[in-house]
Amino acid sequence: MIYVDKLRKEFKKTIKDPGLKGSIKSLFKPKSEKVVAVSDISFEVPEGEILGFIGPNGAGKSTVIKMLTGILTPTSGTCTINGKNPTENRKSYVKEIGVVFGQRTQLWWDLPLRETYGVLKEIYEVPEDSYKKRMAFLNEVLELDSFITSPVRTLSLGQRMRADIAASLLHSPKVLFLDEPTIGLDVVVKDNIRKAIEYINRQEKTTVILTTHDLADIELLANRIVMIDKGSNVFDGTIGELKTKYGQIRELCFETDSPNAAQALGYEKHFGFGEDELSLEAEGKTVKVRFNSSVVPVSDMLSYTLDKINVSDISVKDADIEEIIRRLYKQGVE
């Protein structure tokens, strides 16, 4: 469905010397330098998959999405989606994709939502019978009925996001691009939107590329992760593979009445943990220790802890995906 091969995007950045003299000089003899926003990124997405496309701020995610949606033209490399080149086949291509940008809306601010959908129906040339069936389906999945007659400007953020997702799906696209679809939403609304995305993906085999900083979206929705940093691929695989490869971090949590337990234990000195291989948090009687279990086995950490201090309760759990990705980003930067 989606094939991306050595995609690269370069921009020219104007360099200006400081002060008025520099401003005048830049008018007559402008200097520029090349900035590589995306460097040789490659990946494939089969039909019907939900792909989590993630990376830190400035990693190049938005630039890649803009190239995949045809907004930007790559400097080099190729991308084809459902057999079409996004920039060369722009007119026919946009009828096969839906795009939702969490901080922007494609809806007309002063129009009632129902009329907005009517306008989009004409733009996408959706036949009347297909439109009625589609709206019935979207009403059922996204629960639009309670606000479909309201002007867009009166909608809450959660309602607007559901309305935007419906607008992006009105023409039954084969591929859906979601950029921060749950940003700023409360827990209940987030859960409802996730369920809607999952349902649409399952029922219609819609291929979804999900860009988000909310790692709960990734864990609950994505089958696979492509992670980029500084414009290059850092990881491409399933969440299971990510945890297997980078998930050696464990969290040891215990309750104790021992004073200054976190400092008294002296894990660093006893086990020789390196930088970023151990962290401790203490709040009241609760102490949380995150450590690299490939350096020190869980059994050794448990034995040492129980031998050194009095513990009333203790548990061990795997690191969550947020901790794993944080460490992976740091490795990528270094």
Image (cartoon, helix red, strand yellow):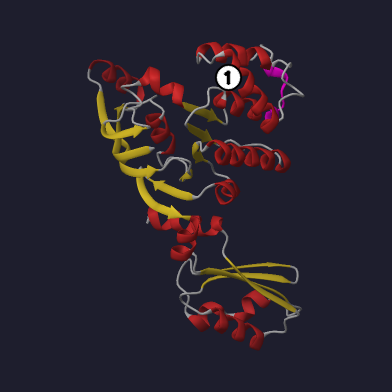
Q: Residue 39: horizontal and vertical position, in percent?
A: 30, 41
The residue carrying pointer 1 sits among few (fewer than 14), some (14 to 19) or many (20 or more) residues within 10 Å by Cα, namely some
Assign the magenta stretch its main secondary structure. helix
Residue at the spot 53% in from the left edge and 26% down from the top edge:
172
Residue furthest out toward the front: 129
- Considering the image in quadrants, where does the C terminus appear? bottom left
- Residue 158 can be seen, yes or no: no
Q: Residue 127: horizontal and vertical position, in percent?
A: 55, 14
Q: Relative to residue 331, is residue 190 depicted above or below?
A: above
Rendering quarter of residue 260:
bottom right
Image check: 59 left or right of 286? left
- Residue 212 can be seen, yes or no: yes
Rendering quarter of residue 184:
top right
Q: Residue 236: horizontal and vertical position, in percent?
A: 40, 52
Q: What residue is pinned by disc 1?
A: 130
Magenta segment range? 152-160
Q: Is residue 158 magenta?
A: yes
Image check: 244 left or right of 153? left
Nearest the camera: 209 or 21?
Answer: 209
Residue furthest out toward the bottom: 307
Residue at the spot 68% in from the left edge and 29% down from the top edge:
157
Residue furthest out toward the left: 29
Identify which amino acid the numbered label 1 is placed on: Ser
Image check: 43 left or right of 181? left
* Number of callouts: 1
> Element type at marker 1?
helix
- Considering the image in quadrants, where does the N terminus appear? top left
